Image (cartoon, rainbow, N blue to C red):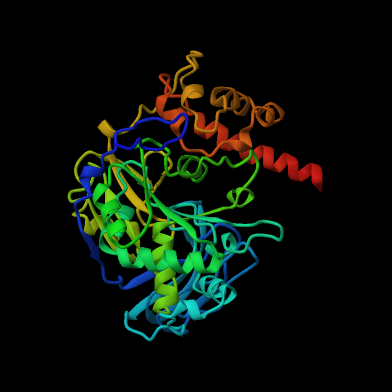
Amino acid sequence: MARLRTFDGGAHPPERKELAERRAVTRLPAPHILRVALCQHMGAPSTPCVQKGDRVLQGQEIGAQNGFISLPTHSPVAGTVTGVEEYPMPHRRSGPVVVIETESEQGEPPFEPWPDFESRSPAEIIERIRLAGICGMGGASFPAYVKLTPPKGKSIDTLILNGAECEPYLTADHRLMLERTGDVAFGMAVLAHALGVKRCFVGVEANKPDAADALRRAGLDVVELRVKYPQGAEKQLIKATTGREVPVGGLPLDIGVVVQNVGTAAAVAEAVRDGMPSIRRITTVSGEGVRTPGNFDVCVGTLFSDLITAAGGYLEGACRLLAGGPMMGIAQFTDAVPVTKGTSGIVALTAGESRPGSEGPCIRCGKCVDTCPMHLVPCAIATAGEHADWEEADRCGALACIACGTCSFVCPSSRFLVHYIKRSQDAVRAMKRAREA
């Protein structure tokens, strides 16, 4: 048997995939009211181009792109705009949303379908992906078209689709690869055409053999990866699949690689083949705090509370709600927040699934160093951050941290390592900007 590929470091948190991995995707109708965020992607929020009282069509642009690292936003339904307002968001304190009263989920595609995409130029394909508002669907939400437009002097020779889905509890990508294999394959072909590359493969962890088999039957080159966290992190995926290493401070394009999530590929298929912008996604709802975990195809702008209801509601003992999984997810103070393009999962944890709420002192055991996939010394960065020593945090490589949470998971003192490191990253970036001003 061939040895499974992987990377140095990492950890093995409980996977808990069994809660939802066998649950076929359920398509939920749009709720009566949608709150569509204008800040669903990394970069500048889109600028609202509708106002209260406007009628909108399904797929109509409701937010205009606002800069290179930005994207347009579209209405998932036909309906009436009832307001543009600030609203709590899953990944930030609040942000602008367009509130839409749903009238219909039917409508003509706003873009011309291109089933024969190979007759289109790479520039046309990339422009369609931009206009469709497609961002990374794995959680980072980086505008997909930007990755497809490398600067002059950068040559891309490899496309990797990320199907690792290493975050515990989450199974949305697994079900997507099983149930929409054709969309993944079509989207991969479109992306390869846009990049002009021939070397393409999908990285899939070995705990999803059915998905790997389905992709192979569709003619895709699958690289099976060892089950280890964070195998799906971009730099670790590249190392495991190609042997190449992204330089510190560099990007995958510096070594000729572009990585897109399998969900992003499926969204590309819908945009190019069918003419539909990015207005829906598959989201896992899991954890021992919900009655019936599952995977749901929902409109962006659907509230978390609607998905919790679709999963049977909370069970007694649910005490913590996460946007995303337990390693990189963000704790929520309310379930009245909207699904965005990057909402890969909603996890309701019980006390038995959560870590202790208090931290102890660092005992210098070195476990965080041994498991760090970026070969950093997390305890040193965290200590600098805890004491607001930003110069020291910078010297220790704070900006190289990918915030995967491995260090916090293995820490026997339950130190809030990622919290301190993220604090350091924000401060170091601000310090550098001030120096450059």
Tell me where residue 200 appears, x and y as whole percent: 46, 57
Residue visible at 35% across and 35% down in the picture: 3
Q: Answer above or below: position of 358 versus 305.
A: above
Residue 112 found in image quarter: bottom left
Q: Answer above or below: position of 31 versus 242.
A: below
Total numbered badges shown on the rendered structure: 0
Tell me where residue 246 appears, x and y as whole percent: 59, 42
In this orientation, which residue lies closer to the viewer: 419 or 393? 393
Tell me, yes or no, if residue 340 can be seen here.
no
Tell me where residue 428 appears, x and y as whole percent: 68, 37
- Residue 3 falls left or right of residue 378: left
Q: Answer above or below: position of 390 versus 69.
A: above
Tell me, yes or no, if residue 117 can be seen here.
yes
Quadrant where the N terminus is found in the figure: top left
- Residue 125 falls left or right of residue 216: right
Residue visible at 59% across and 71% down in the picture: 65
Tell me where residue 337 appears, x and y as whole percent: 40, 57
Residue visible at 51% across and 71% down in the picture: 129
